[in-house]
Amino acid sequence: MRRLVGIALALVLVITSTSAFIRLSQSGLSCRDWPACYGAQVEVPAAVPSDDSPVFIARAAHRIAASAAGILFLVIAALGWHRWRGDSRRAAAVALVVLAGLLAWLWQPDAPGEALPRRLRFWISVALALVALQIAFGGLIGARHAALACTGFPGCGGGIWPQGADWRAFDPFLANDGLGGASRQALHLAHRFGALLLAALLAWIGWRHARLRGAQQALGIALLALVALQIALGATMLLAGFPIALAVLHNALAALVLIVLASMLGRPGPQEKRA
């Protein structure tokens, strides 16, 4: 069962990474070059990708992985209903059909690990919610065509916050029409400020876990490494002009942070009942 969940988790990483590449390449959105076309509206339709183009390959991998993962989700939910009776993973297996991120929870081994303090579990839950919010901000920056709105580092627009920014830019249901450069800069700065606060929280969580034993210690070290890599990658992306390879890697590292945090919560303590 754990091997089945591991395969599904790997497929989800393929889905998110290929989806990020397709989205950032702007295939189908009349935007041929990332991120140059984000500076102006492009009206000329983009050429249809050839059968050997990176976008075509990414689309094929995305569709195959999504189809296989969908089938596995249903199988895991059905098998988990009986295997994890009386276990919190039973509810996670059913909810998996809606939220694929729960795979990291289900993937944890049955052997109990070191019990986590209640306070630490609370802050891990907070960090999970904040990572999800940061990912949403990153997606909104792409949707708002704001990748080049803030090319400076560490500042943006010559101040802490852009003058005349429209807060409606944070509304995911609002069209892009009428949003100026200041509003797009505000999205960038919110993402950066959030990243700094989140990095401090994640570093603390990683440090606490690194002081534990066994799998929890390994998860803590992994989280510290991912935080350091993500900060360095974010700065490198800005200085290098947002190359698509680094943008996709930035997306993949965010997914790995989610997996590590979910694994920390999903790892049972010795007092918890396991199927």
Image (cartoon, grey):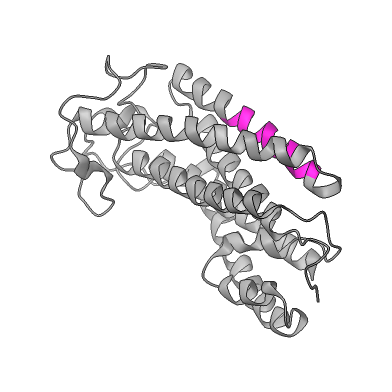
| Residue 172 shown in magenta | no
Residue 11 visible within the image? yes
Q: Nearer the viewer, residue 124 or 234?
A: 124
Quarter of the image containing the C terminus? bottom right
Q: Which residues are magenta?
A: 217-230
Q: Residue at x 21, y 40 (%)?
A: 167
Query: Is 79 situated left or right of 250 in this image?
Result: right
Q: Tell me where residue 177 appears, x and y as whole percent.
A: 15, 43
* Total labels drawn: 0
Quarter of the image containing the N terminus? bottom right
Q: Residue at x 59, y 53 (%)?
A: 122
Which residue occupies the extreme bottom position in the image? Answer: 82
| Residue 226 shown in magenta | yes
Q: Residue at x 20, y 44 (%)?
A: 168
Residue 53 visible within the image? no
Q: Is residue 43 above or below residue 228?
A: below
Query: Is 52 situated left or right of 30 in this image?
Result: right
Q: Main secondary structure of the magenta part?
A: helix
Q: Nearer the viewer, residue 22 or 160?
A: 160
Query: Is 255 situated left or right of 48 in this image?
Result: right
Q: Tell me where residue 73 appears, x and y as whole percent.
A: 63, 72
Which residue occupies the extreme top position in the image? Answer: 158
Instruction: State the image quarter where residue 41 is shown.
Output: top left
Instruction: State the image quarter where residue 226 is shown.
Output: top right
Q: Tell me where residue 136 appears, x and y as whole percent.
A: 41, 47
Q: Tell me where residue 64 appears, x and y as whole percent.
A: 59, 61
Instruction: State the image quarter where residue 263 is shown.
Output: bottom right
Q: Residue at x 25, y 49 (%)?
A: 171
